[in-house]
Image (cartoon, helix red, strand yellow):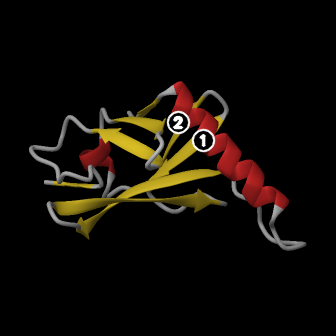
Amino acid sequence: MIQLTDNAVAAIKTAISRASENAAPGAQSAEGLRIMVQTGGCAGFKYMMGLEAQTRDGDELVHQDGVTLFIDSDSQPHLAGMTVDFVSGLDSSGFVFENPNASSKCSCGKSFS
């Protein structure tokens, strides 16, 4: 199962709230965050994230501190046991992934093998 730090939970809740405020009338609101793995990036696989409105076939749902994560069946083995954090700095801010399944990762931390 994926674990979220308190900072990651807060960042996800903020993103969902802002998306709801800016949604077009009648649009389906975001219910959580989808985290998935795709082939690509400089190390072989890359993390993809985006707000999600509904469950898809094969999804695993992770509920933590009022946040729902959607993980597709192909990504589940690559993400099992991962911790997601959100860091803020002067130069940049973003999600950081600590993935025990990654044998190596690129210097930016957004792709792995």
Q: Quadrant of the N terminus?
A: top left
Seen as rendered, the residue at the extreme front is 90
93, above or below 82, in the image: below
Given contact means CB atoms under 8 Å apart, are the residues at marks 1 and 2 in contact? Answer: yes
Residue 41 seen in render: yes
> Splitting the image into 4 quarters, where does residue 96 fall?
top left
**Residue 68 % position (x, y):** 59, 42
The amino acid pointed to by label 2 is Ala
Q: Which residue is mark 1?
A: 11
What residue is drawn where x is 26% and y is 53%?
108
Say which element carries label 2: helix
Q: Report crowding for label 1: few under 14, some 14 to 19, many 20 or more residues within 10 A (C-alpha).
A: some
Is there any visible trace of residue 59 in the rendered image?
no
Out of 59 and 80, give the one closest to the viewer.
Answer: 80
Along the viewing direction, whichever of 60 and 67 lies nearer the viewer: 67
Apparent side of residue 65 relative to residue 88 in the rendered image (left or right): right
| Residue matched to label 2 | 8
How far apart are the alpha carbons under marks 1 and 2? Answer: 5 Å
Residue at 44%, 45% (x, y): give it: 95
Q: Residue at x 67, y 41 (%)?
A: 13
Label 1 sits on a secondary structure element that is helix
